[in-house]
Image (cartoon, coloured by chain):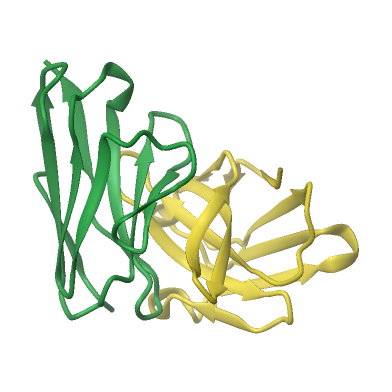
Chain colours: A yellow, B green
Amino acid sequence: QVLLQESGPGLVKPSETLSLTCTVSGGSINNYFWSWIRQPPGKGLEWIGHIHYTGTTNYRPSLESRVAISLDKSKNQFSLRLNSVTGADTAVYYCARYCSGGSCYRLDPWGQGTLVTVSS
Amino acid sequence: DIQMTQSPSSLSASVGDRVTITCQASQDISNYLNWYQQKPGKAPKLLIYDASNLETGVPSRISGGGSGTDFTFSISNLQPEDTGTYYCQQYDTLPLTFGGGTKVEMK
């Protein structure tokens, strides 16, 4: 079955750039959207954005000026970059597959999540 | 953005009880709604898609309904493994948005 695994630094300094990678195994990157979602400690879920296998991206408007999602098909990976981070960006970051089209519109499966703390 | 309002924010019930969670969208989203369960320290897991369709492997005591702006999620015969936080999520319009969550605990 398709598995997703996030990787990247767990600690980022304020004003710097948060960078995470999601590795997809057990299936192809093709024919889906690939999403990033975050969850601040003790709070709810917030969709950050996604990238289509063709390279088209969509972002949450409130983050659009600071975020970039990219794709590396050769490695079956997609990545998140969020710049100028503050403490408000401290969260567990999840990657997930989003199928969009036909009769399928759902975030499934998800990675296990990785905690990123913004602190000096 | 479409706002998703869930209620209650938490509930406590006994084994065998029926519990119901509601989710209200700030505008008509047809049946473009999913429900997820999240256990502590784990990623959310899809339970229901398209408002009322059970994901494969999800027990039939779980159900969902509604359309337009008002949706429900129910668990009949509540079991200890049903504890966790439940989220609704709309996919009518980007950005995808989630409800604030409902924490279900056992009495």
Image side of residue B91 versus residue B13, left or right? right
Q: Position of residue A17 (x, y in %)?
A: 62, 62
Classify the position of the N terminus of chain A by image quarter.
top right
The mark tally for this picture is 0
Left-right relation of A74 to A53: right
Answer with the quarter of the image where residue A41 lies: top left
**Residue at the (55%, 42%) spot, across then down:** A113
Q: What residue lies at 63% left-to-right and 74% top-to-bottom?
A: A51
| Residue A10 at x, y percent in the picture | 61, 41
Which sits in the foreground, B33 or B52? B52
Tell me if A78 is positioned left or right of A47 in this view: right
Residue A22 visible? The answer is: yes
Tell me if A62 is positioned left or right of A119 in this view: left
Q: Is residue A85 above or below residue B103?
A: below
The residue closer to the viewer here, B2 or A48, is B2
Residue A7 appears in view: no
Residue at 90% in and 64% down: A74
Along the viewing direction, whichever of B16 and A22 lies nearer the viewer: B16
Name the residue at 60% across, 44% down.
A111
Q: Which percent across, then down, holds residue A114?
A: 57, 41
Q: Is residue A117 above or below residue B71?
A: above
Q: Residue furthest front?
A: B60
